[in-house]
Amino acid sequence: MSDAGARPLDGVRVADFSWFGAGPIAGRTLADFGAEVIRIESEARVDGLRLTQPQKPGMSGYNVGAYFNNYNAGKASLLLNMGAEGGREVALRLIERSDVFLSNLTPRVIERWGLTYEELCEVNPAIIAAYQPMQGTFGPHRDFLGFGAVLTPVTGISHLSGEPDRRPVGVGTNYPDYAVNPGHTVIAILAALRHRRRTGEGQRIELAQLESVAATMGPSLLDYTANGRNPLRKGNRSSWMAPHGIYRCRDGARGAVHPDGSTVRERWIAVAVRSDVEWSAFCEVAGDALFTQDERFATLLGRREYEDALNQAIGAWAADWEATELVEALQAAGVAAGVVQDAEDVCEHDRHLRQRGFYEYLDHPETGVSLYDGPIVKLHATPGELVAPAPLFGEHTYAVATEILGYSAEEVAELTAAGVLA
C-alpha cells in the first residue's frame, strides 16, 4: 500500500489478457487506483508496442517502447504461452484467483483459447469478464481486427475530418484507443464491481469498440436523421462562430528541418469569436490592420459569408506576432484564444499541467527516468498514483506463478521446460 493511503481498488486483481492500446490503457487506469494488474504476455507473439517507436536513441529490445511503458505502468508481467499444452490450465488458475478478466482480442482467439465467459464461470462464477473486441462478439464482422486508425473511418470520424474540398484525413492517431474505448470499459468494470459487491454476482461485459466510438458521433447522426443532411468536413470552421480557426504566427527557433537545412519551430494559435462584441475586441487588438475596417466583416453573417478572405487576412496579420504574446493579448481582451501546443510545450512549458502535477517521472530499469501520464482523475480521499514503472518482459513470471498461482519451484521449472511459462 502506498504512503497516500488506501486506494479505491485495493484488493482487486485483474488478469489482463489484452494488448496494444485499448485494453492495456483500461488496465493501467485500474492499476493507478489500486488494482493488482497482471499483464499476460507471450514470446510467441510479443505486443507490438514493446517494439515500436518512440524509443530512446540507441536503445532497442522488448523493454524500451515508450508507448508500452506508459500504458502498462504499475502492472506485473507474466509470460504465458497459450498455444502450449497446459497453457490454458495456467490461465484458468489465474482467472480463478482474479476479480476481473480483461481482453481486447477477437472472439475467434478467445474461443480457441477456451476463455469465453461461460468457460471462465466454471472456475470462477464471480468473475467480471470484460471483452473489448473491435466489432463485438457477434455479427458479420465479429472476427475483424484492427486499431483505432481503422475505427475512425468505419465510424464516420474520418469523413468529418479535414477540409471540404480535400480528401478525409482522419485525426492522425489511434484516438479511440487512447480515450473512448478504455474509458468506457473502465466505467463498465466499476459498475460491475459495485453490482458484485451488492449481490455477489459477477457478469460479462461486452464493449464493441466500434460502438463505443460510434457513440461519439451524435451531432452528425442527429443532423442526418432529423434534417436529412449528411454533414461534410468543414476543417476548423464552426457553424456559428467566425473567425474560428488556426493561424500561424512567427516561427520559433527550434523544430523541423527545412529543405535549405535551416530549422524552425512552427507556432500556431487557435481563435474562436462568438459574437460581434468579441469581434470588436479582436479588432482592438489588431489595431490598424486593414481587415478591422472591412465592412464585409462587421457582422457575424458577413464574416461567415466571406470567411475565406477573413482567414487569409487574419493569417497575414498573425504571422508578425509571437504566438504566446498574441494569445495573451487576445485573452486579455476577452477573446477565446490559445496556443496550439506541441510536445515540448506540453512537457516543458505548460505551467498549468506542471502545477497540477499531471505528468510524472518514473525510473525504469532500462530507459531510466522517463515521462508517464499521471492518473486520469484526482480523488481527494483515495487518490490514484503511479507506484511503479512498466514491467520488464516477463519480469514477474516466477513471482506470480509461485505467490499467486501456488506452483512450487519444481512445478514452475517443469512448466518452463514445457514452454508454458518463460
Image (spheres, rainbow, N blue to C red):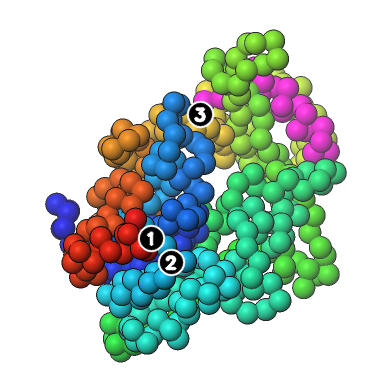
Label 1: which secondary element: loop
Q: Residue 75: x percent and y percent?
A: 31, 55
Left or right of 262 on screen, residue 299: right
Alpha carbon distance from label 1 to label 2 = 6 Å
* Front position among marks 3 and 1: 1
Do residues under tags 1 and 2 come within 8 Å of each other at their CB atoms? yes
Residue 96 — which label? Answer: none
Alpha carbon distance from label 2 to label 3 = 62 Å
User: Is residue 86 visible to us here?
Assistant: yes
Q: Name the residue located 66 percent from the left edge and 35 percent from the top edge.
A: 246
Left or right of 195 on screen, residue 160: right
Residue 84 — which label? Answer: 2
Of callouts 2 and 3, the N-terminal one: 2
Do residues under tags 3 and 1 come within 8 Å of each other at their CB atoms? no
Alpha carbon distance from label 3 to label 1 = 61 Å
- How dense is the environment of label 1, judged by Cα within 10 Å: few (below 14), some, or many (20 and up)? some
Circle 3 residue: 328
| Residue 131 part of the magenta segment | no
Q: Residue 112: x percent and y percent?
A: 53, 74
* Front position among marks 2 and 3: 2
Give the extent of the magenta segment.
Answer: 306-324
- Residue type indicated by callout 2: Ala
Q: Name the residue located 42 percent from the left edge and 62 percent from the top edge.
A: 81
Q: Nearer the viewer, residue 123 or 411?
A: 411
Q: Name the residue located 28 percent from the left edge and 38 percent from the top edge.
A: 365
